[in-house]
Amino acid sequence: MPTKEHRRYAKGILEALELRAHAGPSVGSTEITSAQEFLKRHDFSPTSDYFSRLTRLQSNLRSRPASVKREKRNYGGEAAGCWMQLQSVYDHVILSTCYDGRFNTQRGRIKISHRFNQAGRIDFVELKFLRSLQACLTGELRKLVMVKNYQAVQRDWHEAEAFALRVLPQELVFLLADFFRYPREEILGWLINFGHRTVADLLGDLTTGRVNGHIAESGVSSSQLPLATIGSDDVAMPILEQAAALESTVESNDSESVVLRYARA
């Protein structure tokens, strides 16, 4: 007889597989087999709904025509007065912007990345230390805010729990000089909505033709596409258009957990 914990775990596996079968990325046959083995190992009844759902999922996947995997597209250029990199990846986009500045006589440089899901919601906000104020951190990554289990949650969610970095990097003053004078909830909300506003600025410049192709950034691949051509990307544009119209609020649960909320349409 499966325990309550085993049933909860099985339910999570099934819901994640069913979501991916609907929205991607694709589900492999070995993943379904692994889930079936888990059910057998923990004495789930062969006539239970758990096995039935896996069987239906397996049947649906077999009946689908093979799909061609869309390659990742990488764009770069200047918009809204700053350099931007945009990655269009199957069912999400990542928009990155770079900032530098001086703090206590030291210079630093960071890259802030916002990942948006298919419905324009934030999956995470990430910071990369391109040149940290503490030399030992240069090249390191930090997830500032990350929605819990974001790959499995409903894509048009209105409320979600998220992890928040306990101590935020001092380099964030490069974005806003008074950054750390505000309450923590406002700081985290500002970080998230900064991504939505950046998307809105990008689309505004795209409409008025003020987006440049490339800016010479060290390490940029020669295969990078001009940012001005993003309008023809049928994956990225619907996501960006939804993201530009959204705004989030943040409520703290504790020092490392917050609740993100989007207003209902």
Image (cartoon, helix red, strand yellow):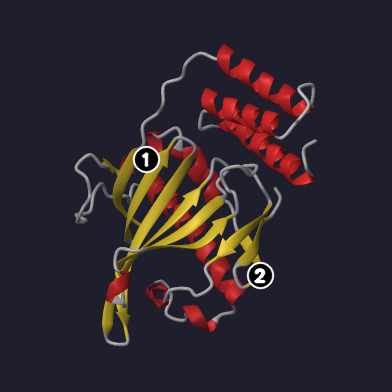
| Residue depicted at 63% across the width and 28% down the height | 37
44 in relation to 108, above or below: above
Relative to 104, residue 75 above or below:
above
Q: How would you rate the neighbour count of disc 2 (Cα within 10 Å): few for under 14, some for 14-19, many for 20 or more?
A: some
From the top left corner, tell me how far across and down residue 82 is, in percent. 32, 61
Please tell me how crowded label 1 is: few (under 14), some (14-19), or many (20+) other residues with Cα within 10 Å: many
Whether tag 2 and tag 1 are in contact, CB under 8 A, the answer is no
Does dot 1 land on a helix, a strand or a loop? helix
Q: Which mark is residue 230?
A: 1
| Amino acid found under the numbered disc labelled 1 | Ile
Q: Which mark is residue 215?
A: none
| Residue 85: x %, y % from top left | 33, 51
Q: Earlier in the sequence, mark 2 or mark 1?
A: 1
**Residue that appears at 61% across and 32% down:** 17
Give the residue pinned by disc 2.
Answer: 252
Residue at screen point 61% across, 42% down: 152
Q: Is residue 32 visible?
A: yes
- Relative to 120, residue 111 above or below: below
Under mark 2, the amino acid is: Ser
Considering every residue shown, the one lying at the far bottom of the view is: 104
Q: Is residue 80 visible?
A: no
In the depicted structure, whether residue 185 falls above or below residue 246: below
Separation of residues labelled 2 and 1 (CA atoms):
36 Å
Q: Quadrant of residue 166 in the image?
A: bottom right
Q: Is residue 145 left or right of residue 70?
A: right
